[in-house]
Image (tube, rainbow, N blue to C red):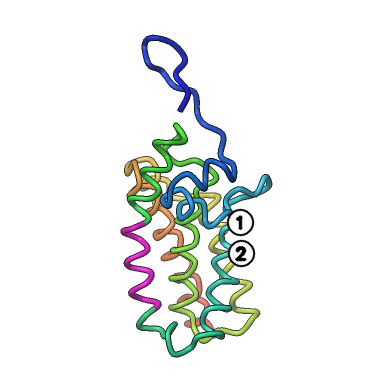
């Protein structure tokens, strides 16, 4: 961050590729660059999650099993708490829009729970997850305001994932 004056107030740092490559936490928090999109970085991060889940699962099915995905998601959540806290501090904004690791982990969770899912189901999952993540209806907005730092960044997206899965549970009950 850049000091403004002797009272040590700081200007936020610009999120770009140079910033991202300074520290591994930045690379992770900014979704390997997907969060640097100038338009709707959260949506681009979610698309990255979707494509990476499919690519990794299809390319290495013996490694990316449902059980291993569960461990990756749990570990990724806790590593994400650290990475998002560090990146937010370094950017000067606790929940900077370029940080999309929270969307990635949460959408991997949605895809894991729904697997195996048709392309149509995955599209609807993407749609509903983005609606809940962007609109932040209660109680997601409550958690977004109440929990701060890396945990807060990560947790509200897990709640959005839960609500996405709830939509599918209701949908399945109706069919």
**Quarter placement of the C terminus:** bottom right
Furthest-bottom residue in this view? 62
Classify mark 1: helix, strand or loop. helix
**Which of the 4 image quarters holds residue 79?**
bottom left
Relative image position of residue 117 (x, y in whole percent)? 55, 84
Q: Residue furthest top?
A: 6
For the record, the magenta segment spans 69-79
- The magenta stretch spans residue 73: yes
On residue 47, the disc is 2
State whether residue 156 is above or below residue 75: above
Pick the residue in front: 52 or 125: 52
* Above or below, comparing residue 94 to residue 79 in the picture: above
| Numbered label attached to residue 156 | none
SS at badge 2: helix
Q: Residue furthest right?
A: 39
Residue sitting at x 53%, y 75% = 53
Circles 2 and 1: CB atoms closer than 8 Å = yes
Instruction: Name the quadrant containing residue 119.
Output: bottom right
**Mark 2 and mark 1: span between their CA atoms?**
6 Å
> What residue would you read off at disc 1?
43
- The residue at the point 49 percent across, 40 percent down is 96
Was residue 14 drawn as part of the magenta stretch in this picture?
no
Q: Position of residue 87 (x, y in %)?
A: 42, 43
Classify 10 Å Cα crowding around label 2: few (below 14), some (14-19), many (20 and above).
Answer: some
């Amino acid at each position: 961050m850049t000091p403004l004056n002797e009272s040590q107030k700081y200007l936020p740092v610009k999120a770009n590729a140079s910033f991202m490559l300074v520290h591994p936490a930045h690379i992770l928090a900014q979704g390997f660059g997907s969060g640097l999109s100038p338009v709707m970085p959260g949506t681009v991060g979610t698309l990255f999650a979707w494509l990476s889940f499919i690519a990794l699962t299809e390319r290495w099915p013996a490694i990316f099993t449902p059980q291993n995905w569960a461990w990756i998601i749990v570990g990724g959540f806790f590593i994400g708490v650290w990475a998002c806290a560090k990146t937010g501090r370094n950017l000067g904004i606790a929940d900077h829009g370029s940080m999309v690791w929270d969307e990635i982990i949460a959408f991997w969770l949605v895809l894991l729970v729904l697997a195996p899912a048709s392309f149509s189901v995955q599209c609807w999952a993407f749609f509903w997850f983005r609606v809940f993540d962007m609109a932040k209806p209660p109680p997601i907005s409550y958690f977004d305001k109440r929990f701060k730092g890396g945990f807060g960044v990560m947790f509200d997206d897990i709640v959005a994932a839960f609500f996405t899965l709830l939509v599918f549970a209701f949908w399945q009950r109706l069919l």
